[in-house]
Image (cartoon, rainbow, N blue to C red):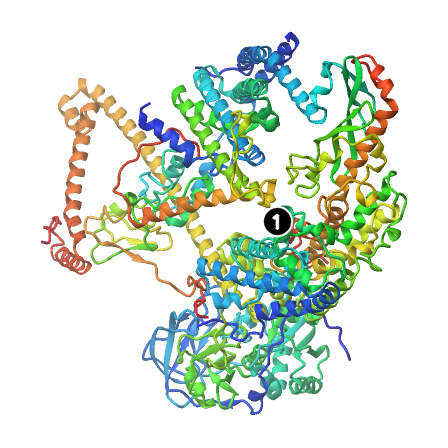
Amino acid sequence: MLTALLVMASIAVVLGALLGFASIKFKVEGDPLVDQIDAILPQTQCGQCGFPGCRPYATAIAGGEAEINQCPPGGEEGIRKLADLLGREFKPLSEEHGVEKPKSVAIIDEQTCIGCTLCIQACPVDAIVGAAKQMHTIVAADCTGCELCLAPCPVDCISMQPIAETVDTWKWRYPVIEIKAAA
Amino acid sequence: MDTQAYREIAWNGIWKQNCGIVQILGLCPILAISTNIVNAVSLGLATILVMAMANLVIAALRNFIPYEIRIPVFILIIAALVTVVDLAFNAYLHELYLVLGIFIPLIVTNCIVLARVEAFAAKNEPGGSTVDGIAMGIGLTLVLAVLGAMREVVGSGTLLSGIDMLIPGAQPIVLFGADYPGFLIAILPPGAFIALGCLIAGRNWIEARKQARARANPPAPSAPADAPAEPA
Amino acid sequence: MNNSPFVRKAASVQSVMLQVLLALLPGIAAYVWFFGPGILVQLALASAAALAGEAAMLAIRGKPKALFLTDLSAIVTAWLIALSFPPIVPWWLTVTGTLLAVVVIKQLYGGLGQNPFNPAMGAFCLMIVAYPALMSQWPAAGQLDFATQLQLIFGGVREVDAITGATPLDALRTALRSAASPDSELHGLRAAQLMDGPAFGWLGGKGGEWVALGYLVGGLWLIQRRIITWHIPVAFCGALFASALVLWGLRPEGFASPLFHLASGGAMLGAFFILTDPVSGATTARGKLLFAAGAGVLTWVIRSFGAYPDGVAFATLLMNILVPLIDMKTQAPVFGHKKD
Amino acid sequence: MLRKLFKFHGGVKPQTNKAPSTTAPIAPVPLPDRLVIPLHQAVGGHPRPLVQPGDRVLKGQRIGGADGSLSSAVHASTSGIVRDVAPALMPHTSGLTTLSVIIEPDGEDRWAELDKLNYRSTPPDELRDFLRDAGVVGLGGAVFPSYAKLKPGKEGHLKTLVINGAECEPFITCDDLLMRERAGDMLKGIVAMRHMLHAEEVLIGIEDNKPEAIAAVQAAIAASGEAGIEAVAIPTRYPAGGAKQLIRVLTGIEVPHGRRSTDFGVQCFNVGTAYSIFEALELGRPLVSRIVTVAGNVAQPRNYEVLIGTPMDHLVRLAGPRADTDRYIMGGPMMGVRMPAFDVPVVKATNCVLVGSPALFPPPPPEMPCIRCGECAKACPADLAPFEMYWFSRSKNFGKAQEYHLFDCIECGCCSFVCPSHIPLVDYFRFSKSEIWAREREKDAADTARDRFEFKNLRQEREKQEKAEKLAAKAAATREKVAAGDAATPAAAGAGAAPAKPSGDDAKRALIEAAMEKARQQKAQAAPKNTEVAAPEIQAEIAAIDARRESAAKATEATPPAPGA
Amino acid sequence: MSEPTALGLSARTGGVMVAFTIVFTALMAFTYGATKDQIDASAAEEKMKLISEVLPPASYDNLLLDDYAALGPTRELGLDNGGRVYRARQAGQPAALILETTAPDGYSGRIDLIVAVRADGSVSGVRAVTQRETPGLGDYIDPKKDKDKKAPWITQFTGLEAARLPQCKVKKDGGDIAYHTGATISARAVTNAVARAARYAADNQNRLFAAPSGSTL
C-alpha cells in the first residue's frame, strides 16, 4: 500500500515539475492564425466588419471577439473558407454588416470634383491621386471598391461602377448539361 | 446560473453537441458495448456517474489546479473515480461487470470525459459543470440505448435481454418469435459501425430539415441566450 | 449549346456493361451444365431485385430513371451477386443481398460511379457475416436436381445439412487441418490425396473448375475488347499463385496448391469481373498492379487463416479502401515531367 | 531513308473528313463590303490603333502598332476608308467585343509601298523588329508572335527546327493545300527561319494521310538543293499536330509545361507561318491574308485565300452553306471555338470555318456519372488522369485539380471524345483554369491592397509623429520666446504667441473648432445623403444640377444644396 | 502575479501534483479495501456457477474451490501454461474431477473448456469458457451462442459413459458426435479435447486425487 503511494507520489513530483518546467521553456510566441485569416480576407480594407481594416478584423476573429460572417466583400465563399480554417460552423453573411455586391471600382466625376482631398485621406490604399484644388482621379487598378471615399465627398462626385468583363477576365462557366428526367 | 442556462447546457449535451453522434467521441465503448440495450445502458449509466462526479470535483477544485499540470491532474481524478466505480460494479453487479469487462476501466480514456472536464468543468462553476456532465452522459447513454436497441432487435429479435442482471427475475421481450434467424452482422462489430452511421445520418437529416425550415420562414430576430463558454 | 469537341466516339456506359454481361455467359453456361439450372432462377431473382431497388432509389433521389435503369450497371451487380452466392440460398437471401448492394452500397453513396466499394462484394460480405451457415452450403456438382433446387430456394424448411457440403475450398481446408492433427485418420495425407473425394475435380472443385474456366474465357474476351486491361487479372492471379506457392512448397501437407487456389472459389470471377470494376478499383496502371496483387495476397491469407471460407470478397473490400491512396501514389508522370 | 520516329501517349483517330475540301485549289475571295479587323489578334499586348475614322488606308498599311515587349502589328487587308475604330464582336465564344478597325474597301486593293529586306545581311534584332511590324504570328492556331520565337536558345544555335505540317484536326486542309501549291515559297520561309535560328536540321512533319503534300514538299526540297531539311511522314493520329506532340514524335523530346522548347534545342513553327515569313521577307508583304478551309455543312468544302477581317458569313456563302446551319466553328471539331455570331471576322487564328448543323454535330447525349473506366487517361496525349481532374474540377477543388497537373492539359478534346459517360471533360478543365486564373488575379490584387494599406498606415503614423515633433518643437520655441520676451516687450510677445499661447487653452480651442468643423461636415454630408433614397435617375439629375451650380458659382463659397424634395 | 521562474513553477506544480496524487490514491485505496471481500465472494460465486453447469452440486460435499491441484504445462490437456484441477469428493471419497483444458485446433484459435469427469470415468459435463469461433458458424459449441436452446450441441457430452468414450469423435471421423455442416472444425476440436481430457482423468485419477490441496503437480 505504502509502496504504491510512494511510487505514485514520486511519479507525480517528476511529472508535475517537468510540465511546469516545459511550460516556461517551450512557450510559443506569436499567432500564425491571424496571418492565415488575414490571407483569406479580401483586403478591401472597407471596415464594413466594424474593424479598421482587414488585419484588425483577422486579429479579432482569432481572438474570438468577432464572428466570421462580418465581411461582405469576402462573401459567402470567404465565410466558408474561414469556417473551414477555424473549424467553426458556416453562417450566412450578417446583414447588419452589409450585403455582397459585384466587384466595383470608384469613378470620380471629373466635372464635379472640387479638389477637396477628403477622399484621398479616406482611401485606405492610396488609390486616389490629386492635390488640393486639383481634380482627383482614381487609379482603377489599385482601387479595392471599399466605398470609403463615397461618404466624405462633399459634392457626391464619386460613384461605384461594376467592373466590366473583358476577354482577359472572362471565365468559362461551370458546365451544366441538363439531364432531362424524360431522357 | 439560472434555469435557462442549465437548460441550455442540458440541451447542448443531449442534442447539439451530443458526444456520440455529433462529436463522435468515445467510439470504442459505443461500438463494443452496444450489442444490446441492457449492456449499453449499464455502461452509459456508469459513464454518467463518472462524468457527473469528475465534472463536479474538477469544477470545485479548478482554482487549485495549475494550468500547466491540469491534464495529468484531470486524468488522475478521472482515473480515481473510475476505479471506484469499477470496484463497485465488481463487488455489487458482478455479472454485469463480467459483461462490461474492460470497458469500465476504459471510461478513463473515453475522450468525452476528459473533453468535458477540459472544455467545461475547468472553466465553470460546479453546479453547471455537474449538469453538463450528466447531460453529456445522458446524451451518450441515449445514443448507446438506441444503438443497443437497433442492434438487438435486428440482430437477435429481442429487447432487454440480460435484464435479469440488473433486475433479478425480469424477462426479456422476444419480438419476432423463437424462429427469427437473426441478422447476425448487426450484433457483430461491423453492425455497430453501420448502425452508428445510420444514427448520425438521421441526426444530420433532422438538423438539415430544421435549417431548411428556418431558412424558409426566418424567425423574428431575437438575441438567443449565449451558451456558456463552448469550445469550437 | 456545347463546346468543343463537337464529335464523339460511339461509346457508352451501357455498351460497356453489356459487354461485361456477355463475357459472363461462358461461365454461366458451365455453371448450368454442372450445377443445374437453379442458378438461372437466382440470376433472375437478383436482376429483378436490383432493378426494383435501383428504380425506387432513383425515384427517391429524383434522378432520371430511364437513363440509369438502362445503363445495365445494376444488372452487372445482380449477376455478380447471384454467381458468388451459393446457388441454393433461399430467395429472400438473394433479394436482401441484392437490395443491400444496390440501395445501400451503391445508391446511398451516390449511385453509379460514386460507390467506394464493389457493391456485389459488399453484399457478399454482409450476407456471409449475417448468415454464415446459409452462405456456406454449396451443393456438389450434379448433386441436386432442379426440383430440389427450386424447393431449397423457395421452400420453407431446409434440411440442408443432409444434402449439401461445404465449398471445395472449405472442405480442403478442413481436411488439411485434420491431416495436420495427429488424432485424425487423415494424418499425414497430402493435399493431392485429400482431393480424392467426389467434391473435387482435377484442379479445384468438381465442376467449379470448369466454371472458372468459363470466366477466364469471358475475361480474356473482355481484355481483347479493351473493356479491361491485363493488369488486374495478371497481378491478382500472380499474387495468389505466388503466395500459395511459398507455403505449399514448404508444407504441402498443410496448404492447398497454387493451382487449386486459382481454380476454386471466386478467384477467376474476382480476377476478371470483380476487381476490374473500374468504379471501386484502382485506375492507374501501376495502381492496378498494386491493387490486384494486394487482393491476391489477402485472398490467400484469408482463405488459409481467416474465419470464413473464401477470401475474394473480403480482400476486394479491403483493397477498395486503399484505392484512393494507391491511385494518388501511383500517378504516372505526365508529359514532359518523366524522369528518363 | 527511314527516320526513327517516336510515339506520344494516347491520342484518338476521329474521322478525318479531309478529302472533300482538297479536290479544288485554293480560291480567292471577292472583297466584302466591310472588313472588321480586331487590333488584338495575337498573344501578348493589345496593339494601339494608328488610324482614325475617316482615314484612307492602303493594303498592307499598319493600322495597329505593336505595344509592349510581346505584341504584333496589325495591317489593313485592303485599301479603303476607315469607317470606325470601335469595339466589335470578336471571334470568341464569350461573345465579347474588342477594339477593331472597320474598313470600307475602295475596291482597288492597292498595296502600300512595301520594304523588302535581305535577311542574310540584316542584324537579328532588326530582323525580328521587322517581322513584328509585319504582323507575322503563328498561324497554327496559337497566334504567338513569331519574332519572339525566332531567337536561338542560350547556346546560340538550335539542334532541330520542326515545321508543323501535320494538320491533325478533322476537316481542316489549309496547310495541306498550302504545301501542295506553294511548297517552294514556303521552303524559302523555312530557310530564312533556319538562318535566324542557326538550326542544324529542319524536320517537316506531315501526317501520312497527305501523300500529295509530302511529295510536293520533298520535290521542293530537292529543287532547292538545301541540305539538312527533311519532310517526314508521321502516323495519322490526333493530336499529332500539337506542337509538343509533334516535337515528341520527330525528336523524342518532351517539352514540359512551362518550359521553352529552345531550352531543349527545338523550336516549332507552322507551315503557314513559314509561308507568311517568306511573304514578309521576300515580298515585303505583311500578314494581311491567310488560307482558310471552309468545310462541314456546306455544298462545296474548299480552301480560300482570305483577307483578315472578312466576315465569316461572306466567306461561307462562297461554299454554299446548307439550310440547317446553326453555327460556325472557328477551327476543327476537336478544338474549334463556337462563334457567337455568323458575321464575326476572319482573324489570323482562323485556319478553318467549320459550318455546323445539329445533324453534323449532334448535341452530346446526357452526361452520365464518371465510372472511372480510364478511357480518358488512355487517350490523353499529355499523360494526365482526366477523370481525377474532372472529379476535383467538378467539386471546385481547384488546388487538387492543379496537383493533378491541370495546367498541362492542352485542351485537345481527346478525353471528351472517348468518354463513355459523355462528360464534357474539357469544359470542366477550361472552367477550372479560368477560375484559378481569376483567383490568382484576386489574390494579387489583395496582396497589393494589403501592402498599400500597410504602407499608408505606416505613412500616417510617421506623419503624425513628425507633426507631433514639429508641434512640440514649436511649442518649446514659443515658450522660450515667451520666457525671453516677457521681460522685454510683452505686447509683441502677446501678439506672437497668440496662436500657440498657453498650450492647454490652445489645444482646447482647437478641439472645439475641430468638433464644430466635424459637425458642419456631417451636416453637409447629411443633406445630400437624403437623396440616396431617390431613384438613380433623380440622383443623376441632382448631380447634374449640382454640377451646373458648381460651375456657375465657382467663385462663391459652395453652400450645401438644399434637399431636393 | 509576476512572471514565475522555471524552477519556481516546477516546484509549485510538482507540489500540487503530489497533493492531488495522495488524496486520490487514498480514495482508491479506501474503496479497494471496502469492496475487497465482496469482490472475492462474487468471483467465487461466478466460478461455482460455471462448475455447477458441468457437475450437479448434489454430487459432492467438499469446498470445491479450495480443493484443487495446480498442473504445469500438460500436453494431454492442451495446457501450455498450466491450469487447475478441482476435486469433488462425496463424504471424503473421490466423486469427480473438474479439469481446465484447451482445444488448440479451433477454426479461429484456441478454445478453453472445463470438463467434469466422474470417478467412474464418465463425462459429467463440458462448457466452453472462452472461444473465438466464427459467429453464426462455429460458435454453437458455446451453449449461450447455440441457436438450439432446448438441446444445445455441447450437452451431447453430458453423462457420456466411459464405455462410449472411444466413440467420442465427430460423425465425419466415424464417431457419435453430431456437428453442423460447414463448421466441422470447431466441433471436432472440442470433441477431441473432451476425449483427451477424459482419458487423462482416467489415467491420472489416483494421482490427481491424492495430491495435497494447492500443490503443483
Q: Nearer the viewer, residue C213 or D247?
A: C213
Q: Position of residue D515 (x, y in %)?
A: 18, 34
Of B118 and C153, nearer the camera is C153
Q: Is residue B158 above or below residue D60?
A: above
Q: Is residue D268 left or right of residue C215?
A: left
Q: How many marks?
A: 1
- The reply to whether residue C325 is in sight is no
Residue position for label 1: C126
Whether A172 is drawn above or below D78: the answer is above
In the current view of this chain or complex, which residue is farthest to the bottom?
Answer: D24
Residue D478 position by quadrant: top left
Label 1 Cα crowd, 10 Å radius (few <14 / some 14-19 / many 20+) = many
**Could one spot residue D272 in this view of the protein?**
yes
Q: Where on the picture, by quarter, is residue D520?
A: top left
Place of residue C296 in the rendered image (x, y in percent of width and height, measured from the top left): 74, 52
- Which of the image's four quarters has the N terminus of chain A? top right
Tell which of A51 and D171 is nearer to you.
Answer: D171
Q: Nearer the viewer, residue C239 or C288?
A: C239
- Subunit ID for the residue under disc 1: C
Establish if C100 lies above or below C9. above
Going by the image, does C171 lie left or right of E48?
A: right
Q: Residue C266 location in percent, x, y? A: 72, 56
D214, above or below D418, in the image: below
Most extreme residue toward the right, as rendered? C188
Q: Secondary structure at mark 1?
A: helix
Residue B109 position in % (x across, y down): 57, 27
Amino acid at circle 1? Leu
